[in-house]
């Protein structure tokens, strides 16, 4: 805790500033035109069973139950020696939507990740537009502080991991990635 005196005119007041003050809520949105089809990207994003293979900081991905519309998965995330588990309910709508929501567990008050896929260029069926949105709130102030220090880097790594996995499965992109503005 840092103590600071603040002067406003003739009034002097005491203010305390804590290193641990941080906004626990985080949001991120990006829209991109990419060189893979909706079906190809859907296959990668919906492959929660293999997240431990290609998603950064994910060491385990276990499917607890599943059908063609939804699944329930437990993920272990972190880096040695700190790992945390959480369970998400994942809604699947082939080939246009994968949405994971976690409202229970020790790590998050809530976590929502949405991947919306729409057709890309009419002249190139091997393109799609990805709307990637993530919103979360940690239960722990310590996790919030660490996440705020590395937030942009973490979401970029996560987003890029799915593109790299698509390259491994389907080859090179048909076009370079283009960042887009606006919502669909």
Image (tube, rainbow, N blue to C red):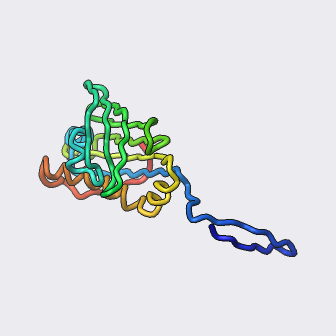
Q: Quadrant of the C terminus?
A: top left
Residue 165 visible within the image: yes
The residue drawn where x is 27% and y is 45% is 128
Tell me: residue 46, above or below residue 167: above
The residue drawn where x is 42% and y is 47% is 134
As drawn, is 149 to the left or to the right of 118?
Answer: right
Tell me: residue 73, above or below residue 175: above
Tell me: residue 174, above or below residue 118: below
Tell me: residue 91, above or below residue 184: above
The residue drawn where x is 64% and y is 70% is 2
Q: Quadrant of the N terminus?
A: bottom right
**Closer-to-camera residue (43/9):** 9
The residue drawn where x is 57% and y is 65% is 19
Q: Residue furthest front?
A: 81
Q: How many marks?
A: 0
Q: Provide residue 36's location: percent of width, then percent of height.
A: 21, 47
- Quarter-of-image position of residue 38: top left
Residue 179 visible within the image: no
**Closer-to-camera residue (168/142):** 142
Q: Provide residue 17's location: percent of width, then percent of height.
A: 64, 66
Q: Provide residue 140's location: percent of width, then percent of height.
A: 50, 50
Q: Provide residue 120's location: percent of width, then percent of height.
A: 28, 45
Q: Residue furthest right?
A: 10
């Amino acid at each position: 805790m840092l103590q600071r005196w603040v002067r406003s005119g003739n009034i002097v007041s005491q203010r305390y500033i804590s290193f641990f003050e941080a906004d626990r809520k985080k949001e991120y949105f990006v829209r991109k035109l990419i060189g893979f089809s909706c079906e190809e990207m859907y296959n990668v994003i919906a492959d929660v069973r293999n997240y431990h293979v290609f998603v950064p900081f994910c060491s385990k991905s276990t499917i607890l139950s599943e059908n063609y519309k939804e699944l329930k998965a437990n993920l272990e995330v972190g880096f040695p020696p700190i790992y945390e588990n959480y369970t998400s309910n994942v809604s699947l709508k082939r080939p246009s939507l994968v949405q994971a929501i976690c409202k229970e567990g020790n790590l998050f008050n809530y976590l929502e990740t949405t991947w919306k896929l729409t057709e890309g260029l009419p002249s190139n069926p091997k393109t799609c537009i990805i709307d990637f949105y993530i919103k979360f709130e940690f239960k722990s102030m310590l996790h919030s502080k660490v996440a705020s220090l590395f937030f942009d880097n973490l979401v970029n790594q996560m987003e890029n991991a799915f593109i790299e996995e698509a390259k491994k499965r389907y080859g090179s992109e048909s076009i370079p990635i283009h960042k887009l503005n606006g919502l669909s």
